[in-house]
Image (cartoon, rainbow, N blue to C red):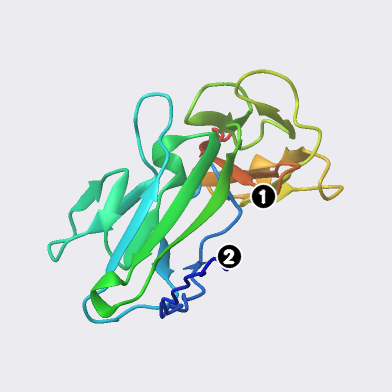
Amino acid sequence: VATPTCSDVKELIVTVIGYETIYIDNLADEYCENGAGPFRIEVNNPGESGAVYTLSSTTNAIGRSPLYVVDGAGVRTYLSSHTAEVAYFDPAYVGIGSYFVTYRFDNTANNGCITVFTKRVDVVAAPDVNFGGITDPVNYCQDGGLVELEGSFVAGGFTGSGNFSGAGIDNGTPDDGRATFNPMLVTPGDHPIIYTYEHANGCLTTRTKTFTVRQSPAV
């Protein structure tokens, strides 16, 4: 006995929607903790009508986000997530650590896709430096002779490199963290002396002190 077989065919049309390649412009891999900025970042595909642009970031241990936006009055608003095409990254506000910055592009209003891009950003150390003790201003008599200077970390220990600049300064060997100050070479008064140190990670730290040179009495 023949057994009849049945069959049915159903067609389904599938539309594959292409997605945009997205990223964040001007966002560096690394910033120094003393970076002053402003460090402006922005999406690579701004201005698409109906699309929603979101920039967000992880926070530090006390809940601070490195991202902020600025309103028309110049007021900063720090949030972990901003609906914006442009934001700013502030390493000094959050301090040392790793932060993951995410750009979410929602183009579903235009029958597009939701695309997400994330980048890790490291904020690295730039320890404070000092020289010539903790007094500021520092007073010297004009005939007091040469003053030896050596750069150090505020937390302790000599830097071993760095350079001095300012009136009356002989920096000697470049990048050795030592110099001499000769008060005889400057006029009486206040003189800014600057010590600049470049850390191994490329960050720069400076310390400026006022050296006050007093005129020696005539004898």
Task: State the residue position of label 1.
Answer: 185
Q: From this viewpoint, which residue is outermost toward the left?
A: 73
Amino acid of disc 2: Val
Q: Residue 56 location in percent, x, y?
A: 36, 50
What is the number of the mark on residue 1?
2
From the image, which quarter does the N terminus lie in? Answer: bottom right
Q: From this viewpoint, which residue is outermost toward the right?
A: 173
Q: Residue 74 location in percent, x, y?
A: 18, 60
- State the image quarter where residue 194 is shown: top right
What is the number of the mark on residue 211?
none
SS at circle 2: loop
Amino acid of disc 1: Leu
Label 2–label 1 contact, CB within 8 A: no
Mark 2 crowdedness (10 Å alpha carbons): few <14, some 14-19, many ≥20: few
Q: In this view, does 127 lie to the left or right of 61?
A: right
Along the viewing direction, whichever of 173 and 199 lies nearer the viewer: 199
Along the viewing direction, whichever of 11 and 151 lies nearer the viewer: 11
Q: Residue 213 location in percent, x, y?
A: 54, 38
From the image, which quarter does the C terminus lie in? Answer: top right
Q: Residue at point 42% right, 39% down?
A: 58
Q: In this view, does 9 lie to the left or right of 86?
A: right
